[in-house]
Image (cartoon, grey):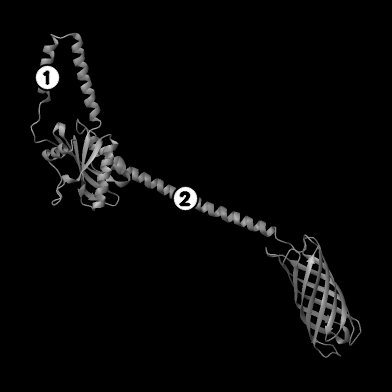
Amino acid sequence: MRTSPMLDNSVNPGSRAARWLGPLVGAGAHRSRAALHCAVLACVALTLGWTGAAHADRVVVIGATGNTHQDALDDLTDAVSEAVRGLSHDAVSEAGAIDAVQQEVPEGANELRAVAEMNNAQWVVVPIVREAREDGYWITLRVGYVLENRVEEIDAEVLRAHEGARLMALLQALLRPEGLGDDVAQLAGADQTGRLAAEEAARRAQEAAEQAERDRLAAEQQAAEEREARERADFEGRERYGADKPMLFEVGLGVHPLLRAGSNGSGGTLGTFEALFGYAIGRTGLELRAGLDVYFGAAGGIALHGGAAYLASPFQRPLHLGAAVDLGFFHGLTGNRVPSFMVRAGALVVYHATSALYLEAQLPEITVLSANGGAVSLGLSVRLGTRF
């Protein structure tokens, strides 16, 4: 902070006022009371007019200079001008006041007053950057006040997060007709207020980030819980085999290569035309079955059988897995016509293809016939059916 007088000789305003008041009082003795009142009112009006004009003083803002790049200097010039306007002054720029070759700025009272008079202004502000950092800068604000022949300076730190308020506080102390006051000691130097504000902003930003992270984790957890709940609900609501329509009717074909043909057999392969009827017991997956098979191929015959099947529903898709066991009698129509006891067992796969169509495969399927020393086949059956 520095204060220096203008180099020009100042005019004593007191003596000028005395010379003006002398004739005014002398003339008042010879004039009417009304004329005296008019003169007093005129003085009051002039005083009020001058006071009002002071609040809208024109301030010349010299283009900022200093140890940083031109874009930053231009931004600083704009920030200083904005702060001047924020203090209800009329800010005008004057980049031409800087020596383009030497990059010298006005310093003395005569130089500052010349700039002010060229712009019909009362104040000149010269911002000079001393040190620039990422988070702020150190600046010298030099201010010349023409009416009081005065030049004052403040060296201060300005943090970017607090730039606008900091510049307004510094300029408010400098752009006063009475000059710098006792508050300059608190304003000059490090930007403690801005640092506290930056720390507070950082703390709030950290808290906001932590809260955002907590909210994100909570939202993810809630979304996961909702997804799991939907999946559980979907799984609980999956199709259960035979739950809605207990009655089953199917027709199909089977292929059963003979592993053992019995004492009189010659081997080969049995084929079957199959018709099957079933009845599901609630949602248990159990189903009672009865069927009629017509054999052809290595031997011709008819088989009647009955049994049970169990089909689980482990997927959300209408795919059911299980097994079936049937007991029955086989009566040959060709070759050996001795009735045989029959046992059949196999794994089951059922797919609900459409609302009315079911596809069923039984494989591997083992069939044992008791006649003539026993015959054994290993094959598969494929059936199409519907439920009602």
Foreground: 107 or 156?
107
Pointer 2: what residue? Answer: 212
Q: Which residue is drawn at 15% across and 36% down?
A: 117
Q: Are marks 2 and 1 in contact (CB under 8 Å)?
A: no
Quadrant of the rendered image containing residue 115? top left
Q: Position of residue 86 (x, y in %)?
A: 29, 37
Q: In this view, does 368 lie to the left or right of 188?
A: right
Packing grade of label 2 (10 A; few <14, some 14-19, many >=20) is few
Amino acid type at image mark 1:
Trp
Q: Which residue is drawn at 14% across and 48% down?
A: 99
Q: Position of residue 336 (x, y in %)?
A: 90, 87
Q: Which of 286 and 275 is in front in this view?
A: 275
**Amino acid type indicated by mark 2:** Ala
The quadrant the C terminus occupies is bottom right
Q: Which of the image's four quarters has the N terminus?
A: top left
SS state under label 1: helix
Compare marks 2 and 1 and give the one earlier in the sequence: 1
Q: In this view, does 29 lie above or below 302?
A: above
Residue 190's label in the rendered image is none
Residue 97 percent coordinates (x, y): 16, 44
Per the image, the residue denoted by label 1 is 20
Q: Residue at x 82, y 69 (%)?
A: 308
- Element type at mark 2: helix
Distance between mark 2 and mark 1 Cα atoms = 72 Å
